[in-house]
Image (cartoon, rainbow, N blue to C red):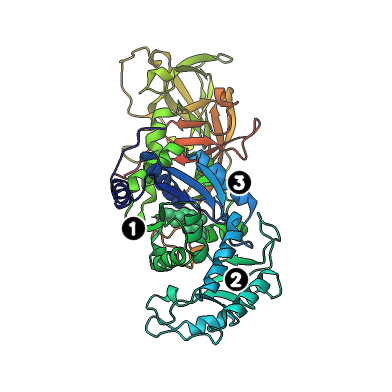
Amino acid sequence: MENKPITSNFIRNIVIQDLESGKHKEIITRFPPEPNGYLHIGHAKSIVLNFELADDFNGKTHLRFDDTNPTKEDTEYVESIKEDVQWLGFDWEELFFASDYFEEMYNRAVLLIKKGVAYVDDLSAEEIREHRGTLTQPGKESPYRNRSIEENLDLFDRMRKGEFKDGEKVLRAKIDMSSPNMNMRDPVIYRIVHASHHNTGDKWCIYPMYDFAHPLEDAIEGITHSICTMEFEDHRPLYDWAVRECEMESQPQQIEFARLNMTNTVMSKRKLKQLVDEGVVDGWDDPRMPTISGLRRKGYTPKAIRNFCREIGVSKNQSIVDEQMLEHFIRQDLNEIAPRTMAVLRPLKVVITNYPEGQVEMLDAENNPDDPSMGVRKIPFSREIYIEQEDFMENPPAKYFRLFPGNEVRLKHAYFIKCNDVIKDADGNVVELHCTYDPETKSGTGFTGRKVKGTIHWVDASNSTPAEFRLYEPLILDEDGEDDKHFLEQINPNSLEVLHGFVEDNMKDVEAHYKFQFFRHGYFNVDPKHNSNDNLVFNRIVSLKSSFKL
Ligand code: ATP
Ligand code: MG
């Protein structure tokens, strides 16, 4: 992996202190996704943070599936998450499923009942909500709060045995109905859900709630620093309560940081799933999605994503990162590694009337002028070529230096050509140009006779390969990057443009995920889903230029 910059942040400082004070000999972090969707760029922030933090101090990181919600979870998600974490360049020390701890969690819940700090409640979800009170008013105790320990043990056992229907009973922690922290007002810690679980099948019909399960999972695994996002700050007292009251041997410390928000996208699995389910996008890996699989399919490299995650840093302040910052890092990476080639996205045929019919010559083209070690390729040139429609104007404005009647331009890697005739169809559309070339002006021969102001790209018409190009714009028009309710109304109707043109012939056998810089157009990736030998498909990863500055 690339040399990573070591930047200090408040979590790192806590770790350093804990190691120096001897509180911990080794640090163990975890990345704990719920397998209810595909990972997104926000998760990448958490992955890079957890794995690199542990790695810097010779510690360990666990990958743990927080799978306590059977109706939302699926093995498809488990597999995609493993693939994405590995693709990002990280290897977990151990792989765990929270569902493997169900028996232990159950036993700890029984312990709470025995200690008199948990009870079975018959109130409905609605009634529990009504009893909870508000920020200014204390809650009301449930009439079932003071059941005997024996009765609670019996009812909890019968909940497990499946004697009750969903929602008929819950297990609640008995803490404080007048606590200023709403999370401490006797939170529900177990609920009844008669549903098959992707890992435990039909073994269980009661499932622990996140706020009870998560601290136990961390403690069972000996996690030292349990890093989560700011929404859980108010849950920390409950986290600590669960670890303490369940008498866990190991005491993990929960530390919160600000989640990643980005402009022009949504970043919650629930919303991303909605986009998939409603067919707004072509699956979780649609290149417009902020998912890891979408970014991969678009053409992002793991290195660019890691560098981005390091640069945004870690703090407690909520902020919205400009999407262009992510683009900055992929440009930086591809600028070094992507070979330069030519592609015409919106073709216009040019006939070079003074070029011998039937002749094809092979011209030298550097694969990267900044890096001679990337070599030189041969590209064919003959009497008919394609140029970009937008590189010709019949009536150009001032300072238009590309092709127009009577004007001369340089063809990249080839010759100067001059436009003499414009051929139109019955409707007046330009369909072909007739030009002449000057053999003296061949690229690489040091011709200095005269200068032209424009250089345009092209591909040979008879020796080129048809290709499809997919250009992307932001999926969401809203720039505030916040997960607001109306995101479906903010969908950009022009987020995908599909074009059909041509690439250099030597690209006809490219495989999925090859990345190129198409001269003047930007960086492109061979699409892994739709590409085939008879149908080349390129996704534009990013254009070449941006006003964005780090
Ligand atoms: P979502 O709302 O997208 O489903 P989540 O937080 O519910 O996200 P989990 O699968 O529970 O998703 O998250 C796994 C880990 O990734 C958690 O530790 C969580 O804090 C972290 N994480 C999720 N989203 C972000 C984000 N936008 N920025 C940073 N970390 C995130
Ligand atoms: Mg979640």
Q: Nearer the viewer, residue 242 or 36?
A: 242
Q: What residue lies at 46% left-to-right and 49% top-to-bottom?
A: 30
Between circles 2 and 1, the one closer to the viewer is 2
- Residue 511 picture quarter: top right
Q: Determine crowd level at label 1: few under 14, some 14-19, many 20+ residues with C-alpha closer than 10 A.
A: some
Q: Nearer the viewer, residue 263 or 423?
A: 263
**Which kind of residue does numbered mark 1 sit on?**
Ser
Residue located beneath label 1 in the image: 319
Label 2, label 3: how far apart the Cα atoms are: 27 Å
**Which kind of residue does numbered mark 3 sit on?**
Glu
Q: Picture coordinates of residue 276 (x, y %)?
A: 59, 56
Image quarter (top left, top right, bottom left or bottom right) of the C terminus: top left
Q: What residue lies at 46% left-to-right and 45% top-to-bottom?
A: 61
Q: Is residue 377 above or below residue 24?
A: above
- Does label 2 point to a residue whose CB lies under 8 Å from ligand 2? no
Q: Picture coordinates of residue 377 (x, y %)?
A: 48, 18
Residue located beneath label 2 in the image: 191
The answer to whether residue 109 of the structure is visible from this angle is yes
- Does label 3 point to a residue whose CB lies under 8 Å from ligand 1? no
Q: Nearer the viewer, residue 96 or 279?
A: 96
- Which label's residue is closer to the chain start, 2 or 1? 2
- Provide the secondary structure element on which disc 1 rests: loop
Residue located beneath label 3 in the image: 79
- Which label's residue is closer to the chain start, 3 or 1? 3
Q: Is residue 120 left or right of residue 185?
A: right
